[in-house]
Image: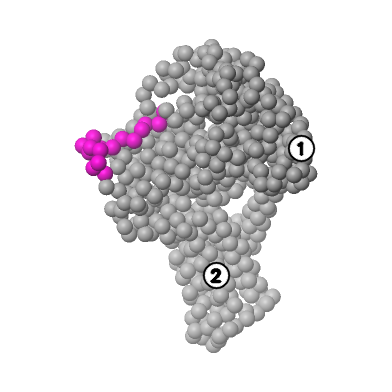
Amino acid sequence: MSERTFRVWRGADDGELTEYRVEVNEGEVVLDVLHRLQATQTPDMAVRWNCKAGKCGSCSVEINGLPRLSCMTRMSVFEEDEVVTVTPMRTFPVVRDLVCDVSYNYAKAREIPSFTPDPKTSPGDFRMRQADVERSQEFRKCIECFLCNNVCHVIRDHEENKEHFSGPRFLMRVAELEMHPEDTADRRRTAQEEFGLGYCNITKCCTEVCPEGIRITDNALIPLKERVVDRKYDPLVWLGSKIGMRPRDTPIAPNIRRAEGGGAEGGGAEGGGAEE
Amino acid sequence: MLPAAIQHPGAVTATEGTGPLPASLARRSPQEVETTVTSTTSAHDDRPGGGRARLNQRTLRTDRWWLGPILTTLGLATFLVYGAARVFQQDHYWVAEHHYLTPFYSPCLAAQCAPEASLFGRVPWELPPFFPYALLSLPILLLFRVTCYYYRKAYYRSIWQAPTACAVREPHRSYTGETRPLMLPQNGHRYFFYAAFVITVINTWDMLVPYFHGTEGGFGIGVGNLIMLVNVLMLWGYTLSCHSCRHIMGGRLRSFSRNPVRYWAWTRISTLNHRHMLFGWLSIASLMTTDAYIALVASGTITDLRILN
């Protein structure tokens, strides 16, 4: 048992880092220490958590500046005298303390055209081999902790890009559907033009922070970029489109953007100026 | 037009007054809270202000995040400076006795090339001195590496600083990524891959020829041969582990089980692709080593150590 110094973000967007001395025992993780803080010193501190096993994706925070799951960050990775700084995810608005409003992610998720099987098939018709589903299975490991979307500099450092960029998590979802052997939709054009794949400059931070170890950049984003090249920048496809052989592009899910746009107008003005 | 809800997500709660998290905290104990937000006292009604945490520090990272970008910059700069110096030196690129030709001059196309060194003949007119002898291959190989998915990461991070390191704020006011017309050539990586593939075949040929030019004619092996062999292996490693190659070999397919051969190829390329960065740096190192060795032998500074004939 030892006493360590923790600096924790307290308050909403205009909050501040507050220093605490807190007891730490062997084998504990950062979330345990946050819970001890809650139990002993700061009963009103807001922390989002659930499974404590790195599988629910709730306890995403930034620890010493690095986006991590607090339940999977052992205290033993820090030096004895190291100050541990815990802040909420920077990319999303703070509700309070360490809890963020991650609704941006849900809005982006809704835009993606869902799985579109051949209408002639009915449930039970698909026979797929392991080789066919392997790639998607890696992406399905995602626990939606949104650490990848949080670390991605496209929206982390440029709030204005949130409008046209869905983040690695949802571009990976598009890639997953694109690689599905029974899917018939073509999301390649929308991936580039609506979900902002072109903003991705493959600097791999999403892969670095993924607690599930999904190789997001190598296995989802780059293959998706290559598929976009097939669709948009291949001279043969371009020639084909000139002589009438147009590929059919699947648009984004209908009634997603405009329908909500009217309702939240006022809120936008209020929330303005919140960026760093 | 996107709803304001997405531009300022926090604002939604403010407008609609749902205040989903703090409000729910007030009346429930942690065990009951399905949303897993815990707080043991009643929260005051501090609704979200609608913004991010106002942290002024560029990053709160305490590790040496700046080390990677610095090393990358130094590595790339070393290669570019060395490569440029050698390409414009236009000498010491060919060891006539053993037919060693440095990869920086292959295939040698300029009229000034040594006749035996030029595999495909020479252009009939003399080029101004600032044109590299390997007129075609150098620009193609440079573009192949510039548009490479690994090198893009490397220079976007270390030189362009977007971002310098993960969770470190980038210094740019705005960011458009690869969406602007200027960045469109990045999408042509696969075409440079095709060309680089052909050039790697030529390099392989260059590597094989010296085996049949021993000191007394006939078969022979020297240290130069071995260095060139390693170099060609690294070049193949780098070229074949390319992400575009992976896509072309099988990544573009929706169904693998209907294309077993391409699936097999894809799995092999994927294994190599894991090490694309490693091959990128190893091939840079082997290119410089090969070239330096051949330059030293060609200039007579050292003699090629012969193992066999």
Asked if badge 1 and badge 2 are on a common chain, one would say: no
* Residue B178 painted magenta: no
The reply, left or right, for residue B191 in relation to residue A116 is: right
Task: Specify the label residue A84 is tagged with.
Answer: none
Which amino acid type corresponds to the residue marked 1 in the rendered image?
Answer: Thr
Q: Residue at x 51, y 81 (%)?
A: B213
Q: Residue B116: image x %, image y %?
A: 50, 73
Q: Label 2 is found on which chain of the structure?
A: B
Query: A19 or A198, which is in the foreground?
Result: A19
The reply, left or right, for residue A38 in relation to residue A127 is: right
Q: Label 1 is found on which chain of the structure?
A: A
Residue A154 visible from this viewpoint: no
Q: Residue B118: image x %, image y %?
A: 49, 69
The reply, left or right, for residue A129 in relation to residue B1 is: left
Query: B178 or A158, which is in the foreground?
Result: A158
Q: Residue B162: image x %, image y %?
A: 61, 39
Task: Specify the label residue A5 is tagged with.
Answer: 1
Q: Residue at x 50, y 55 (%)?
A: B274
Q: Residues within 10 Å of mark 1 (few under 14, many from 20)?
A: some
- Does B24 sit above or below residue B140? above
- Does B256 sit above or below residue A256? below
Which amino acid type corresponds to the residue marked 2 in the rendered image?
Answer: Val
Q: Residue at x 23, y 35 (%)?
A: A119
Residue occupied by mark 2: B230
* Residue A123 painted magenta: yes
Q: Residue at x 63, y 53 (%)?
A: B76
Q: Secondary structure at mark 1?
A: strand
- Does B300 sit above or below residue A92? below
| Marks 1, 2: nearer the viewer | 1
Magenta stretch, residue numbers: A111-126
Query: A19 or A255, which is in the foreground?
Result: A19
Q: CA distance from mark 1 to mark 2?
A: 52 Å
